Image (spheres, grey):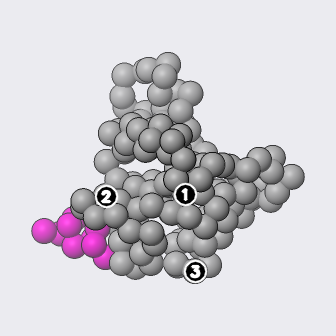
Amino acid sequence: MLHCTLRLCPVVATPEERVRQYWICHLLEEKGYPRGWMTAEVSLSTLLKNCTPNPLRSRRRVDLLVFSPQTQRPLLVIECKAHSLKTTSAHKAVRQLLGYNFFLQCPYIALAHGRELLLWHEGEISEQIPPYREIYHGEKNRATS
């Protein structure tokens, strides 16, 4: 068992959960992401309360999601994987992430495995997540323009 530093409860120490816990700690401790604006393992149906019920959506869970305090909309979604991002199954993970983002409309989307990360933002690909102040200020500027 592991203790989830975001959900504040014990969780089963699966390989994917270890990846999730690494990125939760990294976002909180290294990148300045506020705990109160992050959520883990939340179902799409919970996030999309006002949408028509869909049994496929209700079984799908978003690994990590960061919100904007300015607009309360999602800023960053991270899909955590137990396998390397350089395998053939990474294509399936990208499709899964894009499927989530179809509903969430996050400006930043990422796939993570261990310390390995691929982040997409405005057509650019990066291997690092920007600090929270950077993505939050970008969102704040979009909300006021």
Question: Which amino acid is tagged 1?
Answer: Ala
Label 1 and label 3: CA atoms lie apart by 16 Å
Image point (31%, 58%), residue name: 107
- Sequence order check, earlier mark of 1 and 3: 3
Say above or below: 57 vs 65: above
Q: What is the number of callouts on the image?
A: 3
Q: Amino acid at mark 3?
A: Glu
State yes or no: residue 16 in magenta: no
Query: Would you say the residues marked 2 and 3 are in contact, meaning their CB atoms lie under 8 Å apart?
Result: no
- The residue that disc 1 covers is 112
Q: Which residues are magenta?
A: 137-145
Mark 2, secondary structure of its residue: loop
Task: State the image coordinates of residue 28 (x, y, percent, origin top left).
Answer: 59, 73
Disc 2: which residue: 107
- Badge 3 crowding class, 10 Å Cα cut-off, few under 14, some 14 to 19, many 20 or more, is few
Residue located at (43% from left, 33% from top) = 49
Please say if the residues under marks 1 and 3 sit with CB atoms less than 8 Å apart.
Answer: no
Inspect this view and state whether residue 128 appears.
yes
Q: Which of the numbered marks, if any, corresponds to residue 49? A: none
Q: Crowding at label 1, few (<14), some or many (≥20) Cα neighbours within 10 Å?
A: many
Q: Nearer the viewer, mark 1 or mark 2?
A: 1
| Label at residue 30 | 3
In the picture, residue 23 is in which quadrant? bottom right
Q: Main secondary structure of the magenta part?
A: helix
Q: What quarter of the picture does the C terminus occupy?
A: bottom left
Question: Which label sits in the foreground, 1 or 3?
Answer: 1
